[in-house]
Image (tube, helix red, strand yellow):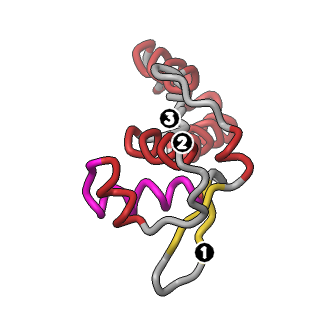
Amino acid sequence: MKQEFLNFIETLIKENPDRANELMTENVKAYLDILKEVKDEKPILTDNGKLLLKYLQDNSDVKCWKAKDLAEQIGISSRGASGAMRKLVNDGFCEKLGTNPVVYSLTEKGKNFTIIEGENE
């Protein structure tokens, strides 16, 4: 969304540079520069995602897990586990197998990913 906004502003400036320079104060220019520099990096893993991925890696002898069972094992809510598992699936660390019940399994990426506290954020 931020990038879309910046693209819109840059298009307006390009279409009418004289008017943009006339209206744009130094504060507005400075703010635009800051917006362009700030990175919108999201953490690779959420806190629950780290806990779940670590647990799955440490218990890789079990091939399939239900989110409810994982939640009970690591002490988080079922809803928290389901959301974190959805993100792990979307990011390629796990795969969703079956639909009733929904079970999850580690992918090669998930098996080989190194979790370092304070990093991967």
Q: Is residue 47 visible?
A: yes
The three-letter amino acid code for the residue at tag 3 is Pro
Name the residue carrying label 3.
43
Q: Nearer the viewer, mark 3 or mark 2?
A: 2
Q: Is residue 22 visible?
A: no
- Specify start and end residues of the magenta stretch as a single range: 75-89
- 105 or 63: nearer the viewer: 63
Q: CA distance from mark 3 to mark 2?
A: 22 Å
Q: Nearer the viewer, mark 2 or mark 1?
A: 2
Coordinates of residue 50 in the picture (x, y in percent): 46, 39
Name the residue carrying label 1.
97
- Which residue is painted at 57% across and 44% down in the image? 57
SS type, badge 2: helix
Q: How dense is the environment of label 2, judged by Cα within 10 Å: few (below 14), some, or many (20 and up)?
A: few
- Which residue is painted at 50% across and 36% down in the image? 42
- Which residue is painted at 56% across and 23% down in the image? 21
Name the residue carrying label 2.
58
Q: Which comes before the other along the chain, label 1 or label 3?
A: 3
